[in-house]
Amino acid sequence: MPKVTREHSITATRKAAMESPIKKEKSIKKEKVEDSPIKQETKPQQQENTKEKDNTVYGEILPADEKQLIDLIQAFPKGISSVLALQHLDGWSINDLVTVGNSLSKKDLIEIRSSSSGAGNNVLTFVAVSEEEVHKLRSMDANEKIIYGYIKEAGSKGIWQKDLKIKSGIHQKQVLASLKALEKRKIIKTVKSIKNSIKRVYMLYELAPSDEVTGGTFYQDNELDVEFIEILSHAIYRKILKDSMPTEEDQLLPANYPYYPTVSSLSNFLNNSDLFRSGVSLDNDDVQGLLDRLVYDGKIERRLRTSIASNSIDDDDDTWMYKAVNTSKSSETTLTCTPCGQCPIFKMCSDLGEVNPSSCEYFSKWLEF
């Protein structure tokens, strides 16, 4: 057996100390190699989570085909037809479109509307539902959704409770329960109708009732405001009377005078006056009704516009002008019954003047009568 000296012992110790870090480093590398498959396995999971987030619409994860279709529908705010949708969806058939569309409709994400084409075929239109509307629909039960749909379809005209029962086919008690629940959540509201003050119509909470329901500008608290109509009619007549007369006494308006008031100019005149209740304004249809009333009363007459000239840009499309009729009949005499007795330019009439009896069309018509 060889003899081990102290020098050999020190050398062996140093050699062991030098080898130990190498072994330790190898073990660390081995652990890293063993850990690496675990990290590699987590990468596909992270990609999958990212993909799911991309397919999320209003908090709900959709399949790829549903996400593709709803992205296309949302790109068309007014809706997209089935024909146009198939042009954008490569490899899709009409059956695929209808199946995926029905799935999105059940999730309250889109509306599917059917309309008839010229050839007699039904064309489907897909319309995206807003996020607010989606959350609103998801808060309703099945009966409430049906009732809400018919009320929404009625628009600003509203719908009677009886009509809701007939259209929906839901029992009366369930209809009342649904209406009460929707009204409590301020999704719908009731409005009194001028057609029947006892009955009420239902419409969406954010809509303003149409004139057909409230009666329009001339109604207040479901009653015709006769005094308001008289005030407006008088104001219109005074304005027309003023614009129907020459500004100077010796001035004569030509027969084709194009500057008599029109519906649009009178509407602007009234809306800029201080005759209205707070929050009330007149549109051209309202003013036309007042003008028709004055025509029937014989206070004004209509004249067809033969010139492009107008008082304002707003009345370029108006066909008719309105001129005041002289209705002063303080005393019924032979003179006042003739056109001369009611003529506003009687003082300007003479045998040799521009206005004379021989060329007066009104006098000639009176003689023929």
Image: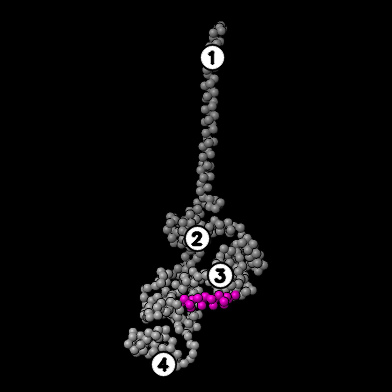
* Magenta stretch encompasses residue 234: yes
Sequence order check, earlier mark of 1 and 4:
1
Kind of residue at disc 1:
Arg
Q: Nearer the viewer, residue 315 or 160?
A: 315
Q: Main secondary structure of the magenta part?
A: helix
Name which residue lies at 45% across and 93% down. 334
Report, in whole angstroms, how far the alpha carbon at label 3 lies from the one at label 2: 40 Å
> Are discs 2 and 1 less than 8 Å apart at CB?
no
Sequence order check, earlier mark of 2 and 1:
1
Please, what secondary structure does the residue beneath circle 3 have? loop
Report, in whole angstroms, how far the alpha carbon at label 3 lies from the one at label 1: 107 Å
Any part of residue 320 in sight: no
List the residue tagged with mark 1.
Answer: 14
Write down the region rendered in magenta. Answer: 223-240
Please, what secondary structure does the residue beneath circle 2 have? strand
Report, in whole angstroms, how far the alpha carbon at label 2 lies from the one at label 4: 66 Å
Sequence order check, earlier mark of 2 and 4:
2
Q: Nearer the viewer, mark 3 or mark 1?
A: 3
Name which residue lies at 38% across and 76% down. 258
Please, what secondary structure does the residue beneath circle 1 have? helix
Q: Residues within 10 Å of mark 2 (few under 14, many from 20)?
A: many
